[in-house]
Image (cartoon, helix red, strand yellow):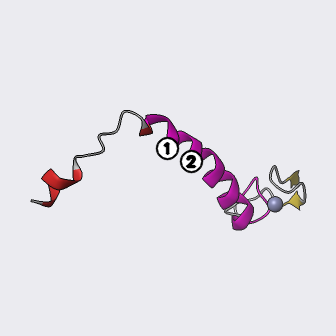
Amino acid sequence: MVICPRCGQPSLYAPSNPARPFCSMRCKDVDFGAWANEEYRVPDESAPLADDDAEAN
Ligand SMILES: [Zn+2]
């Protein structure tokens, strides 16, 4: 048994829990989304903005 890093509830740390160390997939998704959003925000500035037109052709 471990503590879910997201909500602090006891969570089962075993292969039967695909969301471990989180207590549920919901908690895992929330945590993943949080850091994933931050990751994707970093290269946003260097991404070309007016490249969509060339690709559509
Ligand atoms: Zn949780």
Residue 31: give x, y in percent of width and height.
Answer: 69, 52
Q: Is residue 9 magenta?
A: no
User: Are the two marked residues, 1 and 2, in contact with CB atoms closer than 8 angstroms?
Assistant: yes
Which residue sits furthest left? Answer: 57
In the picture provided, is 55 more to the left or to the right than 4? left
Q: Which dot marks residue 36? A: 2
Image coordinates for residue 16, horizontal then vertical, percent = 71, 66
What is the magenta range?
Answer: 20-43
Report crowding for label 2: few under 14, some 14 to 19, many 20 or more residues within 10 A (C-alpha).
few
Question: In this rendering, does residue 16 appear at all?
Answer: no
Q: Is disc 2 placed on a helix, strand or loop?
A: helix
Q: Position of residue 41 (x, y in %)?
A: 51, 41
Q: Secondary structure at mark 1?
A: helix
* Residue type of the residue flagged with mark 1: Tyr
Q: In the rendered view of the protein, which quadrant contains the N terminus?
A: bottom right
In the rendered structure, find residue 40 and report the number of the disc placed on it: 1
What type of secondary structure mainly makes up the magenta span? helix
Q: Is residue 28 above or below residue 37?
A: below
